[in-house]
Image: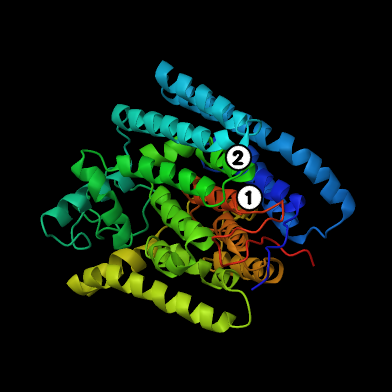
Amino acid sequence: MPSAAPRDRSAPAVGFTLCALCLGYAIYVAMGTYNHPAMVGLTLAGIFCVTALLLPPSQLSESISRKLLPLLLPFCVALEALLLWKFEDLFHPDPTISAAIILAGAVGVAMAIVRPGMRGGLVIALVMIFVIAGITRVRQLHIHIDVLLFQEQSSDALLHWNDPYAIRFPNIYEHNTPFYGPGVVDENNMLKYGFPYPPLSLLMVLPGYLLGNVRIMHVLCAAASGILMYFARPGRLSAMAAALFLLTPQGLLVTYTGWTEPLLTLNFSLAMFCACRRPKMLPWMLGLFFATKQYTVFALPALCMLTDGPDRGKQLFRIVWQAGLVVAVITLPFFFWNPREFIRAVALWQLVQPFRKDALSYLVWIWYRDGQRTPPIWIPLLAVIPAVLLALWKCRPGPSGFAAACTVIFLAFFAFNKQAFCNYYYFVIATACWTLGTMQLTGKKEPTARIAAVGVSTS
C-alpha cells in the first residue's frame, strides 16, 4: 500500500461538478423528458464528464481550476436551489416548501465559507430540511404513476405471504398506452407481469408501507445518501457534493413519485462509505447495490477501481464472491418461489418495454432525424463499451475512481437507451457527486481507509 493517497487534481473536480449541474438542468427543463434544451444539458454533461477524465495535467488547467472551484461550488448549489424552488413552486405551490428550499439553498452555500467544525452541523441541518420538505410533499401529493402502484400492491401481497412476482396489476393508463410494449396489457386491462424490480427494492419500501406511504423510504434513502456523502470524507468538498446532490432540481420529484433510484443511490452510497471508512464491509454493501436494480450489472467492470496493490486479482475475487453471496441470499428465495413468474417480471418485461419517443436519449434525437424509424435495441450496449474502456484506462484505484467509472458508464448507457428519464439520470448525478466528494485535493491520507483515495489518472 502507498504511504499516502496521491493528491487529486482540481480540474476533474470542476468537470464532475459541472457534469452534475448540467444533468440536473437537463432533467429540470422538461421533467426528464426529451426536448432540445434538455439534450443540450445532457450533451454538456457528457462533455464535462469525458473531459474530466481525458484532460491532461498542466499547471495552467490546475491553476485555473483551483481558483475556480471555491467559487463554482457555491454558485452551482445556489443555482440548483433556485431551479428546485422554481419547479416546486410551479408544480404545487406551498409557502412551507418554498421557505424550506430557500433555507436549504442558504445552508448549502454557507458550507463553502464556514469553519470546518461547523460543516457537519450544516450538512445535518440540510438533510433535516430535505426530509421535512420531502415528507410534506409525500403527504400532500398522490401521484398517478404505475411504479408507485407496483410498490404498494406488491408490499401488500408480500405482507400477506403472496408472491409479488405472480400478482397482476391494473393498467392505470389508457388501454393503448405507449408506456407498455405489445402484449403487456391483456383484454381485461390488466398487466401480464408481476413486480418488475429485484426483491431488495421491495423489501426496502416495506417499512414505508407499514407507516402508511412507501415514498417515506424514498425520502429517507435520499437523505441518508447525503449524510453518507459528507461523512465518508468530511471536508468542504464532500459537504458541497452532498448539497449538490440533495438540491438537484428534480430531487424531490424523484422521491415523491416513487421511482426506485433513491433506494439504489442509498446502497451505492453505503458501498462508497465503506470503501472510504470500512473496507471490510465493502463487498457486502456492493452486494446490496447489485441486488437493487437490473442495470447495475454494468458497474461490474468498475469493481477493478476498488482494488489496489500487487494482489488485485485476489481482492477482486473476494469482492465478487462476497457481493454475489449477498445478491443470492436476497434474490434466490423469491426466484424459487415461482421461477417462471420471477424471470418474466424481472428479466423478460425489460426486453418488451417499448422505445419511448419522449425519452431523454440520443436515440430519440436519431429517431426524429431518421424518418422516425426505431433504432436497434443493441445501441445502448454498444455505447457502454467505449465508456467501460475509458473508465478502465483513465480511472485509478480508489473510491473516487470507482464513482467516476460508474458515472461515465451509466451516463453513456442511459444517454443511448430506449428509455431514459429523470430517475435514471438522478442516479448518475449521485455518482458524479460521490466522485467529487471523495476526491482529496489536499493530499492528506485518510487514516481509516485502507484503499487509496484517488480519482482519475494524471497520465
| Mark 1: secondary structure | helix
**Is there a contact, CB below 8 Å, between mark 2 and mark 1?**
yes
| Mark 2: secondary structure | helix
Tell me the amino acid under the disc marked 2: Met
Q: Is residue 432 left or right of residue 293?
A: right
Q: Is residue 62 left or right of residue 338?
A: right
Q: Residues within 10 Å of mark 1 (few under 14, many from 20)?
A: many
Which numbered disc covers residue 455?
none
Q: Residues within 10 Å of mark 2 (few under 14, many from 20)?
A: many
Which numbered disc covers residue 240?
2
Q: Residue 374, position in %: x, y?
A: 53, 59
Residue annotated with mark 1: 436
Residue at the (53%, 45%) spot, across then down: 230
The earlier-in-sequence mark between 2 and 1 is: 2
- Looking at the rendering, in which quadrant would you find the C terminus? bottom right
Query: Which quadrant would residue 9 be assigned to in this image?
Result: bottom right
Q: Nearer the viewer, residue 376 or 336?
A: 336
Q: Residue 275, position in %: x, y?
A: 52, 62
With respect to residue 25, does 458 lie above or below? below
With respect to residue 357, does 70 lie above or below? above
